[in-house]
């Protein structure tokens, strides 16, 4: 089992060992003077010995502190380098970006965007991938596509809803002999008592409610048929008058099918079509596409966007995230990983997603049957393992050394500035 490490404590120790001044260390770490002092006291208690000598004039490393720095610093340097290499490997625009489309979202706006970005960014190869209409988010989460072009009605905490590239008017598709077929426009209230096509359980519920409202504005029910998983069958039933289907204008080839009439909705706003991606999988290619789509939509001359699409600073990575990564890489199973870590599966998954967000790429491919490392995740784990071991061993060795040499543990008696001092009667100031 991978031991616990506390990178926050280690970073504070290494910065203070370099600065030998609590104020400057606090400034570099972006925390308060008192927080650095508290962190160092906690680390000293964990080791069981004093790591810094504090006097009124200076702060110096003890012999044990110097030995610990000598072991920790190279390991931390290698760990940071491994994380940086992983982030850098996905930070450029060069490479392939897979854009998922369904039979109803493979529109002219999508092809115009793909063609335009190919001219501006020839190193970024966009490929269109056909995905099933009834499970649009599944391929995103499994890492089969990088970006989804779909209707932007999203209520999923792990997905980012990016820029809109087009808006599509809403229509009601009915059979030519339907009672509403002769109307020039309809309202949602006209659907009272009608039956619309039901969708498979895998279809996002928020999107279903937006496309097929369950009730009229006055509260009258709008019936839904049993799930129909074939779009062709839906429109066949529409043509025969068995149900009606709220849709987007101009869905080909079904909108051109004989026997079907499209009637505009007078009270429904256009449906936005845009880019959606997994927040944890965001990388520079996705950010470039999003910025370009925004600029194109605004008819701008340059690619610009007020939103900050950059991923989190990898220097904020926590030891618990790396421990979860290495354990899941060993187990390839969230439930077993959570059990080994003493966490819930959802918490283990959350730690992995935090790290993926910091790196800017998926580290695992997730399916219903298996969890396996992506190439980025595999390379990162290979580089992290020795550095992680060195960090854990450095702390353990310091703890054993303090017991062997009998060095006194640090006192918990704080001076007026919150720092423990030696029993010299002198008040420490840093």
Image (cartoon, helix red, strand yellow):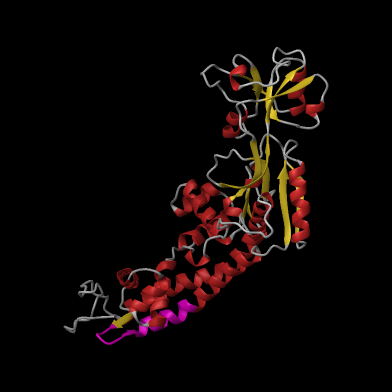
Instruction: Report the residue that reaches farthest toward the right.
Output: 258
Nearer to me, 81 or 67: 81
Which region of the structure is painted magenta? 54-73
Instruction: Determine whether, in the image, residue 364 is placed left or right of residue 239.
Output: left
Residue visible at 51% across and 52% down in the picture: 337
> Residue at coordinates 39% horizontally, 81% vertically from top-left?
17
Left/right of residue 421 with respect to residue 158 in the rendered view: left
Residue 302 higher or lower than 167, as above or below: below
**Where is 298 relative to 424, above or below?**
above
Q: Position of residue 215 (x, y in %)?
A: 55, 21
One can see residue 1 in this view: no
Residue 351: in sight, yes or no?
yes
Q: In the image shown, does 228 or 420 lie closer to the viewer?
A: 228
Report x, y in % for residue 24: 37, 78
The image shows residue 400, relative to residue 123, as above or below, that is below
Q: Position of residue 403 (x, y in %)?
A: 32, 76
Q: Nearer the viewer, residue 288 or 344?
A: 288
The reply, left or right, for residue 430 in relation to residue 72 is left
Quarter of the rendering containing residue 46: bottom left
Residue 227: which quarter of the image?
Answer: top right
Q: How many marks?
A: 0
Q: Is residue 424 magenta?
A: no
Q: Which residue in the rendered view is the most extreme toward the bottom?
A: 57
| Quadrant of the snapshot with the C terminus | bottom left
Quadrant of the rendered image containing residue 119: bottom right
Q: Residue at x 76, y 41 (%)?
A: 107
Q: Is residue 68 a member of the stretch shown in magenta?
A: yes
Left or right: residue 25 versus residue 321 is left
**x and y, in percent, of residue 56 in the image:** 24, 85
């Amino acid at each position: 089992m991978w031991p616990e490490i506390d990178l926050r404590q280690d970073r504070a120790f290494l910065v203070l060992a370099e600065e030998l001044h609590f104020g400057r260390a606090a400034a570099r770490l972006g925390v308060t003077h008192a927080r650095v002092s508290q962190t160092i006291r906690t680390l000293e208690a964990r080791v069981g010995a004093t790591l810094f000598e504090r006097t009124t004039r200076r702060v110096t490393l003890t012999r044990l502190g110097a030995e610990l720095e000598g072991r920790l610093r190279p390991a931390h340097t290698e760990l940071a380098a491994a994380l940086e290499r992983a982030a850098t490997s996905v930070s450029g625009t060069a490479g392939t970006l897979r854009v998922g489309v369904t039979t109803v979202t493979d529109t002219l706006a999508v092809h115009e965007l793909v063609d335009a970005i190919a001219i501006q960014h020839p190193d970024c190869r966009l490929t269109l991938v056909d995905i099933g209409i009834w499970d649009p988010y599944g391929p995103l989460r499994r890492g089969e596509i990088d970006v989804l072009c779909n209707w932007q009605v999203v209520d999923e905490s792990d997905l980012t809803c990016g820029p809109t590239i087009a808006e599509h008017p809403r229509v009601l598709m009915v059979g030519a002999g339907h009672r509403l077929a002769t109307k020039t426009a309809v309202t949602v209230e006209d659907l009272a008592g009608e039956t619309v096509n039901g969708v498979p359980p895998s279809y996002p519920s928020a999107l279903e409610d937006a496309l097929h409202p369950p009730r009229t504005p006055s509260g009258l029910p709008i019936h839904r048929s049993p799930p129909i998983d074939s779009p062709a069958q839906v429109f066949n039933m529409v043509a025969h008058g068995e149900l009606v289907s709220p849709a987007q204008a101009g869905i080909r080839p079904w909108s051109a099918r004989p026997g079907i009439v499209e009637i505009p909705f007078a009270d429904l706003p256009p449906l936005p079509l845009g880019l959606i991606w997994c927040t944890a999988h965001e990388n520079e290619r996705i950010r470039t596409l999003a910025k370009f789509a925004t600029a194109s939509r605004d008819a701008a001359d340059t690619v610009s966007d007020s939103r900050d699409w950059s991923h989190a600073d990898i220097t904020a990575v926590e030891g618990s995230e790396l421990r979860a990564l290495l354990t899941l890489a060993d187990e390839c199973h969230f439930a077993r990983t959570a059990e080994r870590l003493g966490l819930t599966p959802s918490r283990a998954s959350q730690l992995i997603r935090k790290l993926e967000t910091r790196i800017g790429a998926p580290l695992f491919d997730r399916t219903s049957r298996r969890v396996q490392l992506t190439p980025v995740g595999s390379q990162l784990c290979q580089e992290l393992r020795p550095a992680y071991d060195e960090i854990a061993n450095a702390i353990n060795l310091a703890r054993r050394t303090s017991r062997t040499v009998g060095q006194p543990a640090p006192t918990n008696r704080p001076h007026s500035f919150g720092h423990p001092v030696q029993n010299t009667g002198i008040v420490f100031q840093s």
